[in-house]
Image (cartoon, rainbow, N blue to C red):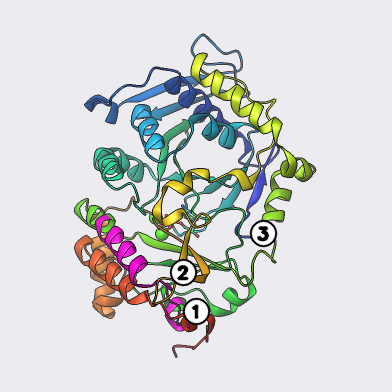
């Protein structure tokens, strides 16, 4: 299943990389977290910390299964960002690193980035190109200020920026971010929208065969889809979108998308994606995963103590987290507080039958030379309005226009999803 991915356990070709990523995060994050909190200073934004891991270990780094190097970028800034995103440090480490299990989604986009889910499905690790990594470091201060001033921002929540270097020299840069979709709700339809139509279609046959595949702008239009929000939610959503997109435009960013997952309350969880998630993460322990009460608490407690006092700890003894008790941090966010998302409303602002999970993702493409060339060549044969690579202000305006036009409180538009062909 596209939404669940493949479990990366010992023997998997990317197991060593995944293990190294998680070990680095565990040590880097708990080291920073063990210090007394303080205000950020300018140098925190450019800071980087190097760790060298080997099987023997030393006074700075505990022993690891493999030899590798790890770099933690701007650890204090990300510590503060995690606070702004209401993440508890101990929970973060338990979710990500307690069992060294990730689930690999492979490379769903064209960029070649790999995506991994934490085993409770709460966090995503995305490998990024060196240029994206550099760019995130360049804009980190603006990103941080934006998150601080916009507690309900819809843009991706970045929790960490790191690099692992394997002994034969390969460097892998990656970010940790929020998974927009909660594990306890089936996502019945998913769209990645940019506001342009050229090349923005998932083949309808494929879409029908695989309902969890991500559809695009043309599918959205052909299926007559809408975000079903009444005046109140429409105004809130558009105001936040505008603030977010203004930031992206001012930083010269384009090619981002609005990712939308739709949960139909009438259909509920009949498709049982949640069960298949549990079986992927804990093939023989799903029963424990469902009943892990006291164990979970004691491990979180143990972690918290360890994080607060001693720095890095081994989490191998840890237990199973229950997806239902995850996402508590979401209640703090306007757009993620209706069961992890934003519930549909009608003309009178009364609740409807859908929950929308909405976020702005893929923020690290700067409108640079490559994009300009792409724009020039595509511009020769296609109308400007259809091409996705246009300068940032134009991209932002078209993006916002597309979303504003996509909001309609009439429930009929969502219930009936006729599939028209364009030809
Ligand atoms: P490209 O540059 O070719 O568009 P990419 O490798 O940069 O691709 P993204 O566009 O970031 O990848 O994401 C690809 C897909 O992965 C999305 O369409 C979505 O299905 C899934 N995805 C990405 N980010 C998230 C997220 N935060 N939560 C849930 N799913 C996500
Ligand atoms: Ca993308
Ligand atoms: Ca991308």
Residue highlighted by disc 3: 273
Which residue sits furthest top?
59
Residue stretch rendered in magenta on the structure: 220-243
2 vs 3, front mark: 2
Magenta includes 238?
Answer: yes
Q: Which residue is mark 1?
A: 414
Q: Residues within 10 Å of mark 2 (few under 14, many from 20)?
A: many
C-alpha separation, residue under disc 1 versus residue under disc 2: 10 Å
Evaluate whether residue 411 shows in this view: yes
Pointer 2 residue: 344
Secondary element at tag 3? helix
Mark 1 vs mark 3, CA separation in Å: 22 Å
For residue 219, above or below residue 262: below
The overriding secondary structure of the stretch rendered in magenta is helix
Q: Nearer the viewer, mark 1 or mark 3?
A: 1
**Looking at the image, which is closer to me, 252 or 322?**
322
Work out how far the residue at label 2 is from the one at label 3, CA to CA, in angstroms: 22 Å
Among numbered discs 1 and 3, the one appearing first in the sequence: 3
Residue at x 34%, y 45% (from the top left corner): 132
**Against 408, is 252 above or below?**
above
| Left or right: 94, with 34 as reference point | right
């Amino acid at each position: 299943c596209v939404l669940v991915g493949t479990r990366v356990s010992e023997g998997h070709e990317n197991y060593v990389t995944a293990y190294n990523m998680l070990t680095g995060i565990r040590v880097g994050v708990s080291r920073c977290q063990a210090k007394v909190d303080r205000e950020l200073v300018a140098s925190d934004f450019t800071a980087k910390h190097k760790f060298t891991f080997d099987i023997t270990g030393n006074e700075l780094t505990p022993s690891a299964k493999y030899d590798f190097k790890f770099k933690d970028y701007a650890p204090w800034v990300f510590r503060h960002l995690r606070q702004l995103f209401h993440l508890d440090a101990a929970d973060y480490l338990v979710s990500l690193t307690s069992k060294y299990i990730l689930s690999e989604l492979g490379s769903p986009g064209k960029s070649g980035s790999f995506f991994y889910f934490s085993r409770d499905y709460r966090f995503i690790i995305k490998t990024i190109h060196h240029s994206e990594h550099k760019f995130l470091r360049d804009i980190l201060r603006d990103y941080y200020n934006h998150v601080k001033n916009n507690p309900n921002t819809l843009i991706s929540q970045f929790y960490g920026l790191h690099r692992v270097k394997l002994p034969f020299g390969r460097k892998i840069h990656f970010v940790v971010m929020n998974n927009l979709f909660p594990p306890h709700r089936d996502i019945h339809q998913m769209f990645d929208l940019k506001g342009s139509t050229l090349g923005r279609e998932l083949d309808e046959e494929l879409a029908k065969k695989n309902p969890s595949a991500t559809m695009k702008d043309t599918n959205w239009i052909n299926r007559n889809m809408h975000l079903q929000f009444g005046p109140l939610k429409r105004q809130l959503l558009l105001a936040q979108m505008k603030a977010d997109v203004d930031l992206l435009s001012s930083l010269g960013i384009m090619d981002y998308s609005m990712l939308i997952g739709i949960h139909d309350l009438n259909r509920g969880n009949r498709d049982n994606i949640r069960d298949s998630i549990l079986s992927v993460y804990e093939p023989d322990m799903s029963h424990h995963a469902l009943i892990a009460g006291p164990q979970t608490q004691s491990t979180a407690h143990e972690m918290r103590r360890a994080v607060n006092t001693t720095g890095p700890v081994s989490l191998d003894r840890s237990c199973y987290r229950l997806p239902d008790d995850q996402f508590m941090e979401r209640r703090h966010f306007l757009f993620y507080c209706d069961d992890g998302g934003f519930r549909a409303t009608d003309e009178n602002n009364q609740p409807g039958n859908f929950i929308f999970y909405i976020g702005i993702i893929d923020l690290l493409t700067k409108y640079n030379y490559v994009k300009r060339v792409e724009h020039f060549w595509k511009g020769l044969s296609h109308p400007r309005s259809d091409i996705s690579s246009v300068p940032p202000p134009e991209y932002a305006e078209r993006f916002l226009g597309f979303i504003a036009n996509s909001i309609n409180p009439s429930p009929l538009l969502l219930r009936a999803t006729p599939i028209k062909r364009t030809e």
